Image: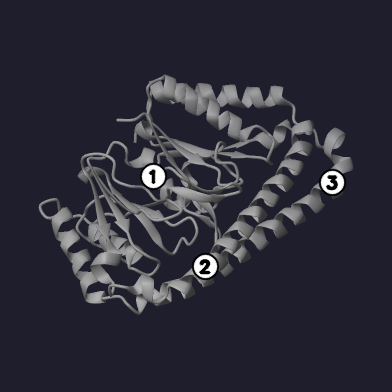
Amino acid sequence: MEQSSHYFARGNTARGAHFLYNSAFDGLDRIYVLNGPQGTGKSTVIRSLADNLLDKGQHVQFFHSPLRPDELDGIILTGLKIGLVDGRVCEGITESQADNIVYYDFGDAIDYDRHLLEHTKTIEDLGNKLERAYSQAYDTFLTALRIHDEWEKYYIESMDFKKADQIAQDLIQALYTGRESDTPTVGRHLFFGAATPKGAFDHIQSLTSQLDRRIFIKGRPGSGKSTLLKKLAAAAEVKGIDVHVFHCGFDPNSLDMLIFPQLGTAIFDSTAPHEYFPDRDGDEILDMYTLTMSPGTDEAYASELAAIKERYSAKMKEATSLLAEAEAIDSQMKAYYVAATDYSIVDKLQQQLQSEWNELISNPLSE
């Protein structure tokens, strides 16, 4: 088993900023929340703790930032059911697990009087600009989604829904028979990727690399890929089969992948922008276009579809550049806080956290 799993639990989507921390961090015994503005070293501390845990042979779940995917929003120490997260990004956690939360305030490391007082107005203005850039990005993603809906219509009209439903029923039968349990489960909701300032980014390959079976769903917009995954997820929960439910980073109302840990199986939408092809034993293709669509649909509407695709791509490009703008503004704001932070205090907070976690590894929480 690999020592780490990589996810996102927030996304910049056509539905706005979307958070899945409530589900992703559900069932933990304790959650450490690091509060404080950007630039106070939270992500660096999270990374350092994660590396330390990996060195100790622990399994760590990494939660990446959609603004800067190489930075971390949080981690989970899998074996001990302990989470650590940046308080600025973990919307949804406090409502569900208020009893188990420990707060660390990285804002204590900031010298507001000496360094920030004179820049208050500038930082406020940058904050407003950042909000506007995000808001415009979300609006632009929503416009792209509306264009995507137009794209889907051509295929939905050619779709054989009976056949699509039969595919779902056959898969439910093939995957779950003999594996059912009397106790229903609740799926764990995550993102495998995100819309970032550099475009779409995903962790599909690393998340599925250890699995025995991977089903690559091919098709067109509107060919029933997400609906199929929703049916499989709902049936898995009823039949008591553990399932990780991965939402689309562009439209979180859609699903893009399911992983069944006990079945060693993943089934996922393998079309752009996360298009992959079978490359080993246990990989197979499920082509919804061939199986459920009237032959010749692509050809019948070729010119209309090409025009829609062009409009869609242009809007996605525009939204991505707005995210890049947000990232640049965020970096400007960050610089003010970096200049005002006493990193010797951050080091002390890190040491405190580190010794607390070392203690927990030596003496796990007894429930």
Find residue 120 and name its label.
Answer: 3
Element at badge 3? helix
Where 324 sits versus 2, above or below?
Answer: below
Dot 2 alpha-carbon crowd within 10 angstroms: few under 14, some 14 to 19, many 20 or more:
many
Q: Nearer the viewer, residue 164 or 230?
A: 164
**Separation of residues labelled 3 and 1 (CA atoms):** 42 Å
Question: Would you identify the image quadrant in which residue 69 lies?
Answer: top right
Question: Would you identify the image quadrant in which residue 253 lies?
Answer: bottom left
Q: Nearer the viewer, residue 108 or 317?
A: 317
- Residue 163 position within the rendered picture, expressed as x and y whole percent measured from the top left: 21, 72
Nearest-to-viewer mark from 3 and 1? 1
- Residue 188 position within the rendered picture, expressed as x and y whole percent measured from the top left: 36, 51
Residue 3 relative to residue 106: left or right: left
The reply to whether residue 32 is in sight is: no
Where 74 sits versus 123, above or below?
Answer: above
**Separation of residues labelled 2 and 3 (CA atoms):** 37 Å
Query: At x 17% / y 54%, what residue is drawn?
Result: 175
**Separation of residues labelled 2 and 1 (CA atoms):** 22 Å
Q: Earlier in the sequence, mark 2 or mark 3?
A: 3
- Residue 29 position within the rendered picture, expressed as x and y whole percent measured from the top left: 40, 39
Q: Nearer the viewer, residue 42 or 67?
A: 67
> On the image, numbered disc 2 is attached to which residue?
145
- Tag 2 and tag 3, C-beta contact below 8 Å: no
Query: At x 37% / y 22%, what residue is drawn?
Result: 57
- Amino acid type at mark 1: Ile
Query: At x 32% / y 58%, what residue is drawn?
Result: 218
- Amino acid type at mark 2: Leu
Dot 3 alpha-carbon crowd within 10 angstroms: few under 14, some 14 to 19, many 20 or more:
few
Nearest-to-viewer mark from 2 and 3? 2
Element at badge 2? helix
Residue 225 relative to residue 203: left or right: left
Q: Earlier in the sequence, mark 3 or mark 1?
A: 3
